[in-house]
Amino acid sequence: MTSPSGALRLLSGGAAKGLVEALAAAIADATGAGVDVTFGAVGAMRERLVAGDACDVVILTAALVAELTASGHLVEGSSAPLGGVQTGIAVRAGDPLPAIADGASLAAALCAARAIHYPDPVRATAGIHFDGVLNRLGIHATVAPRLRTWPSGTIAMRELARGVEPQAIGCTQVTEIVANGDVSLVGMLPPPYALATLYVAAVSTRAAEPGRAMRLVEFLTGGASASARSAAGFET
């Protein structure tokens, strides 16, 4: 999503894509400008910030925001939480919902799938976690020929929806599942494989207009956007 010159520049994990896009008009009202956003795996967004990409505000995991604040890339005291995001399992809209209530049923569903779509297992929060889940379940080698990895969860869900393989399945953060009307949320990863990730917004130390950037953080994390965050899949 790109706005005219003068827009606030935002680097964001894909988990917040649906939320930011839904709030585009309200953001402009709250800050006096639109946003020029780059979405992607949080690791990739961290790399871009550290490399010097133009940025006013980030939305990343709490751990990365803490790291980047300590290293001087984000303004101390500017961070605020959007909420937690669970990691879930998805299928194409209209497909039967497999049982995933425990580790055994989750493993069975994954082994039955002809394709398994998930985000980057090196730089995406859900991708890193899900790759570990496959190892913990002892099925990584079994399903390896059917694994389909993508740069972000948003793209993984798009490709799941577009795919033609029967019994295809996907895993990513719930916000990226509910933002795609062509896939259905089966449910959250079951204990002990569940993952909830806290997402945080913060102001970049290179922000061109720190005051306006802070207004964006306050709007995204405050009461005015609480219902939108909940609808997008954030647990606030």
Image: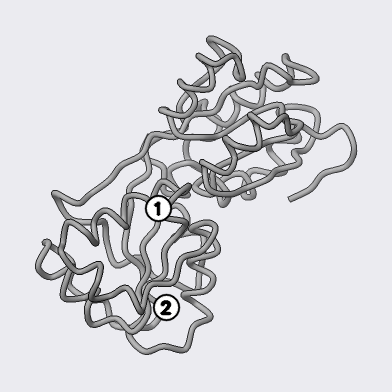
The spot of residue 228 in percent (x, y) is 51, 43
Task: Please report the residue visible at 47 percent of the width from the left and 29 percent of the height from the top.
Answer: 64
Task: Please report the residue visible at 44 percent of the width from the left and 71 percent of the height from the top.
Answer: 148
Question: Which residue reaches farthest front?
Answer: 141
Residue to which mark 1 is pinned:
173
User: Residue flagged by tag 2: what amino acid is it?
Assistant: Ala
Question: Element under label 2?
Answer: loop
Task: Please report the residue visible at 74 percent of the width from the left and 38 percent of the height from the top.
Answer: 35
The spot of residue 93 in percent (x, y) is 42, 78
**Dot 1: few (<14), some (14–19), or many (≥20) neighbours within 10 Å?**
many
* Viewport quadrant of the C terminus: top left
Q: How many marks?
A: 2
- Location of residue 69 with respect to 32 vertically, above or below: above
Quick one: 3 or 150, which is closer to the camera? 150
Residue to which mark 2 is pinned:
93
User: Residue flagged by tag 1: what amino acid is it?
Assistant: Gln
Q: Quadrant of residue 208?
A: top right
Which badge, 1 or 2, is on the more N-terminal residue? Answer: 2
The spot of residue 79 in percent (x, y) is 52, 19
Colour treatment of the image:
one colour
The spot of residue 233 in percent (x, y) is 41, 48
Question: Element under label 1?
Answer: strand
Quick one: 147 or 107, which is closer to the camera? 147
- Location of residue 187 with respect to 45 vertically, above or below: below
Labels 1, 2: front one: 1
Cα–Cα span, label 1 and label 2: 17 Å
**Dot 2: few (<14), some (14–19), or many (≥20) neighbours within 10 Å?**
some
Question: Which residue reaches farthest top?
Answer: 77
- Location of residue 226 with respect to 122 vertically, above or below: above
Task: Please report the residue visible at 23 percent of the width from the left and 56 percent of the height from the top.
Answer: 133
